[in-house]
Image: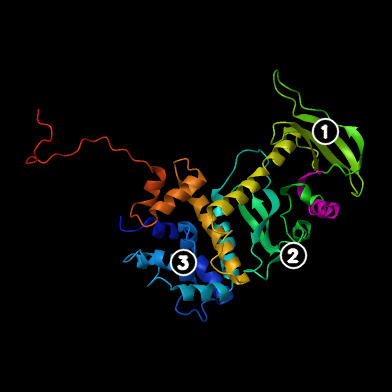
Amino acid sequence: MNYTLFSQILQYLPNKIVEDAVKKYDTDKHSKGINTQRHLVSMLFCQFSGAQSLRDISNGLNSATGDLNHLGLVSAPSKSSLSYLNEHRDWKVFQSIYYSLAQHYFPIFKQTHFKIRSKIYLLDASIVSLCLKAFDWAHYRKSKGGIKLHTLLDYDGCLPAYLSITEARKHEVKVAKEISIPQGSVVVADRGYLDFELMQKWDKEKVRFVVRSKSSVLYQVINQLPLPELKEGQPKRILADEKVRVNGYDKPLRMVLVQVLDDDGNKAELELLTNNFTWTAETVAELYKQRWHIEIFFRDIKKHLKIKSFVGTNENAVLTQIWTALITMLLLKVLKAKAQYKWCLSNLIYFLRLNLFVKIELIKWLNKPFIIENKPPKIHKNQLALFPT
């Protein structure tokens, strides 16, 4: 094999997707000799290798002497050129590449946990803290900076179908009202999205929802719905299933009261509101339980990829780095889906980081990362025995 693992990973990035995005935003104008494709490769190397600075990116790519042509590079970009491009090349080109790539690959992801045929989306937001002295445009609090990632996660791939990056002070509900969710879909959200105007908007658009309620919400019980029958020894998880009228909402809703264990192992109760009356109460509870996948997504992208420390300080550079991190995460999920070996995402990232410039067949390595050879060593006929018999 004459190609490195990194160059083979880049083959999962169709050239047409990049070319269409470049044409749309005209980002190869004033490119300083580094077009959008090369810029993207450099920033993907930053994410895959865990580079800490622009110097690390430049030096790291320079270490692949003789193999840069396989990456589509004539030479490694200098620190100053990469800094300029991160600050000035429109970050929307990388956003466009991500969405086109997602549309290309999402069909290979399919969760079979539910029999629900509708598309399931998980909605949440997460703050990325920034130093206000370095990122003076990212105002959050008096002495603290930050941005907020508003994410609509596709449950099948556990990847964003929509992501908006705003100042950290912007409320989640304001952004959620701007998101167009396909008719007939299911959206699952935490109590931060308990907004009756938003929920009525979803209902009018024929979107089914499961949203955690708050203890301050006032409601009247219209009637009790039958609880699921328990098998012998099965713990009682559904405490109540009710048709209710909630103050501030113009139609009856269904409230499912679920018993769970909190972080300390104590019993707690969750009140879940939904506009669907045909699912079982267990399905409603399980849908909300799967919301944890979006928390895992935020954890993984912050822990394993570079969106907490940045190689540039202006807004364009930060958004460029976040969108290239999302492209990286999508490529990692594609590799994980294609591999026969059951990779843990953190292990896959770690092993790729160690072997980026190793020349081995990618799929073969993904399927069998640990090859143990039991063949006895070949002994040359003229070689002296170390322990003569």
Q: Residue at x 16, y 39 (%)?
A: 378
Marks 1 and 2, how far apart at CA: 45 Å
Residue under pointer 3: 42
Q: Where residue 266 sits in the image (x, y, percent)?
A: 73, 31
Q: Which residue is mark 1?
A: 241
**Contact? badges 1 and 3 (CB < 8 Å):** no
Q: Is residue 272 visible?
A: yes
> Which secondary structure lies at badge 3?
helix
**Around disc 1, counting alpha carbons within 10 Å, would you say few (fewer than 14), some (14 to 19), or many (20 or more)?**
many
For residue 182, above or below residue 278: below
- Cα distance, mark 3 to mark 2? 35 Å
Q: Nearer the viewer, residue 71 or 15?
A: 71
Picture quadrant where residue 373 is located: top left
Q: Is residue 154 above or below residue 241?
A: below
Instruction: Give the image location of residue 163, x and y in percent.
Output: 66, 59
> The disc labelled 3 sits on which kind of residue?
Ser
Question: Hey, what amino acid is under mark 2?
Answer: Lys
N-terminal of the pair, mark 1 or mark 2, is: 2
Viewer can see residue 96: no
Give the residues drawn in magenta, as a range. Answer: 195-213
Residue 168 picture quarter: bottom right
Q: Determine which residue is flagged by label 2.
A: 142
Lower position in the chain sequence, tag 3 or tag 2: 3
Q: Nearer the viewer, residue 12 or 134?
A: 134
Q: Quadrant of the C terminus?
A: top left
Q: Nearer the viewer, residue 113 or 176?
A: 176
- Residue 165 picture location, percent across and down: 67, 63
Name the image quarter holding residue 319: bottom right
Badge 2 density bin: few <14, some 14–19, many ≥20, Cα 10 Å: few
Identity of the residue drawn at 78% across and 57% down:
173
